Amino acid sequence: MSDFDTVPVGDIPADASILDVREDYEWVAGHAEGARHIPMDQLPARLDELDPDEDLFVICRTGGRSFRAVQWLVGQGYSAVNVAGGMDMWFEAGKPMVSDNGLKPVVL
């Protein structure tokens, strides 16, 4: 993958590794089923939790934070792409979501 690629939600493979970089309260309210959660400000400290050889599809709410996270990850030698439109587009596309609060998943 080239530096700073961006892909639409519809182009994410079903078995993709999705990295959600939103804040804890956003994650709890609703996230992509099967995604991994590392808030953007924790990425440097938790980088060893990620496989540098795995293609990461990085998502936030609208795409801004995830774009910055992708820039940083690629600079560290990781394979990462930004998900265009973020969780807002994920939700609009009807992709599977779960919440950690027992309520119907929503995007905050």
Image (tube, rainbow, N blue to C red):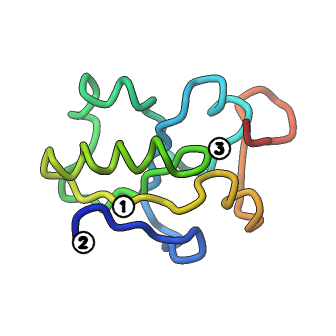
- Residue depth check, mark 3 versus mark 2: number of the one nearer the observer: 2
C-alpha span from label 1 to label 2: 8 Å
The CA span between labels 3 and 2 is: 25 Å
Q: Which residue is mark 3?
A: 31
Left or right of 69 in this view: 31 = right
Query: Which mark sits nearer the N-terminus, 3 or 1?
Result: 3
The answer to whether residue 21 is left or right of residue 77 is right
Assign a secondary structure to mark 3: strand
Which quadrant would residue 53 be assigned to in this image? bottom left
- Which residue is outermost to the front? 64
Question: Where is residue 85 drawn, in percent x and y?
Answer: 60, 59
Residue 84: x %, y % from top left: 53, 62
Q: Secondary structure at mark 1?
A: strand
Q: Are marks 3 and 1 in contact (CB under 8 Å)?
A: no
Q: Amino acid at mark 2?
A: Met
Which residue type carries mark 1? Val
SS at badge 2:
loop
> Residue 44: x, y in percent?
24, 28
Few, some or many residues within 10 Å of mark 1 (<14, 14–19, 20+): many
For disc 1, the marked residue is: 81
Observer-side mark, 3 or 1, equals 1
Label number found at residue 1: 2
Question: Could you tell me which quadrant the C terminus lies in?
Answer: top right
Badge 2: residue crowd in 10 Å (few <14, some 14–19, many ≥20): few
Marked residue nearer the N-terminal end (1 or 2): 2
The answer to whether mark 1 and mark 2 are in CB contact below 8 A is yes
Three-letter residue code for mark 3: His
Image quadrant occupied by the N terminus: bottom left
Which image quadrant for residue 50?
A: top left
